[in-house]
Image (tube, rainbow, N blue to C red):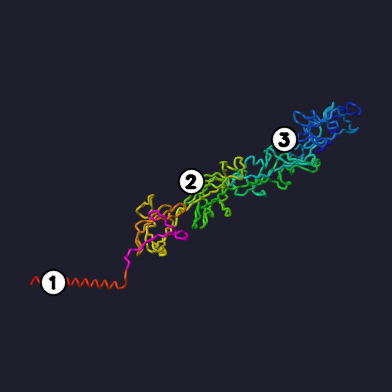
Amino acid sequence: MFILYYLYSNINELKVIFEKIQQTITQNIDIAGAEIKDVIDPRFVIVKDGESVTNEMIKNAGGSINLGDGGVVSVDESTGNQVVKWTNQTIPNAEKGTWSRTITVRAKDEYIGGNNVPTNVSPDSKITTGYGEAVLPQPKVNVKSDLFVNNKETTIFYGDTVPTTEDIINALFNKNAPQGRVKQLDGTENLVTYTIGADGKPINPDEFELKWYEDENCTTEISKENMAKVKPEPDSKTYYLKVTYENDGLKEVTDENKNNTNEKISGNGDGTLKAHNSQDNKEREYGVYTIHIIAGQIQITKELESIAKEAVTFTFDVKKGKDKIATATARIEAGRAEATITFALEKNADAQINTDMPALTKLARGEYTVSEVSNSSYTLKSATVGVATNCKSEVTNSNEIKFTIGTDTHSTEVLKNGNADTTNGQIGVAEFTNEISVANVELEKVDKADHSITIKGAKFALYEADGNWGKVSKNPVEGYEGIVSGNNGKIEMKNLPVGNYLLYETEAATGYTCPTEPWRIIVGSGGTVTVQDSNGSAIASKSGSEPAIYQLENAKVYSLPESGGPGTYGFTISGVAILATALLLFINNKRREEEAKRS
């Protein structure tokens, strides 16, 4: 607020008027009927009773407001300037006294401030008399400036560039609508938008210079164009913005106008004004632009439909587009159905591993696939998308799931084109369920009469069976053509795929008969095993065996039972001797008969 005191009798032009009067009139006289008009500079408004008088108030008051000292303020409709008039005034000759008035003005809120600023318009501000006109002086003041640069935070998806769109820049500093705090008549401060430049003309956006820096000390400058090419790493990236306003209205500073404004000046007196951070007390001459970066992640779960009988490992390929970025390993321990997942990154892969979750993290926007590498011992029963998934996803084939990181489940790209969703589009969960597709079949060759007697050395061959239990091929299953019962009669057939089989005994152990009919072996889904005889009757597993052991019976070779004791051999010899004696007697009698006939 500025109090302007005019001592109009001392105006030089007014003195000239008095001199002209004295040339025609011998005595000193006053000037009557004078009009004093003070046209207020458009950067200021009149203050009355501690309140700014606005043009709207003047209009609502009927076009003028009485200031209480004979002065009336109105509005020049052609310029919008406020005009104070004192009409029909008498200005005394200097020898008799003075005519003076005091008015109070304040800078408009929308004026950015400046130095050596005139408070009225010349030569429109003047005294008009019947003897001529005198132009009023122009009291000049400094109007303190306050200019803000704001802070701005935004969030982008990893892989996107730093946003430098107009709305982002304007949020930090809007050249067309610069802002600052202006002290009000009641002592409070209001946030205002400036529309009038320091020179009194409309704000010129070209007079504001914006410079970007990469460090808080503002030593490493970066252009907005280069900043827009940066793809920052998670979790955040910060830039710093300095704003300088340059206008001729900030340059000239005089002792007189400094005295009028308690030594205050606008800017630093060299024609420039630096903006300060809007969030502190002018401590930082820069705004802070913070970019938060969120990234995607992929989780994998693996489970079996039944408890694993022995430890098993599965592997998965994780690709971004066509490029493999990681391998996931799922290990299931014996006695469990759920896997423990670990990840290993490919060389130069731009991702990270969270071992606690576990998950593959720091994934940029894009398409990723998770595919299970085939395991010959297990069948993949299902590949599904987990319920925690909040990005676009699809099962592309029986063993592969595709996730579009950075896109939500409704196919909308998050954090793009005005989308501000910082939750969705980030998580993909691939769930795979397997069942065992092979079985370990354990048999035991035993004596039919006594199962406690095991048979070693029996030989077997395994054949695939068709639906009618005939051989699919005349050749045995590869790897199962030379099966031999070992110690304790044990027969092991490991990793036998799901299917129907015929087990033929090709050579019996010594002392045992060789069965002509095969045994039937059925390996079902989940690795279940059923053993039957040739008629389809189930053979029970050995009591208490785990895993199950199925006993195959063999009978010994048939022989006549022995009777009597060691005397048998004596009888046999005696019988042979009797038979030999009888034969000799028979031969001897035939010889005698032949001799009798010749004689």
Quarter of image, res 124: top right
- Residue 580 in percent (x, y) is at 21, 72
Instruction: State the extent of the magenta-drawn residues as a range.
Output: 533-562
Q: Is residue 513 left or right of residue 357?
A: left
Which of these two is toward me, 272 or 487? 487
- Residue 560 in percent (x, y) is at 31, 65
Crowding at dot 1, Cα within 10 Å, few <14 / some 14-19 / many 20+, comes out as few
Question: Secondary structure under badge 1?
Answer: helix
- Residue 213 in percent (x, y) is at 65, 47
Q: Is residue 80 left or right of residue 520?
A: right
Res. 276 in view: no
Quarter of image, res 200: top right
Residue 397, label in figure: 2
Residue position for label 1 = 591
Task: Reply yes or no: does residue 225 show up in magenta.
Answer: no
Which of these two is toward me, 529 or 96? 529
Q: Amino acid at mark 2?
A: Asn
Which of these two is toward me, 469 or 450? 450
Which of these two is toward me, 474 or 266? 474
Residues at marks 3 and 2 touching, judged by CB atoms closer than 8 Å: no
Res. 498 in view: yes
Question: Secondary structure under badge 2?
Answer: strand
3D distance between C-alphas at marks 1 and 3: 170 Å
On screen, 300 above or below 598?
above
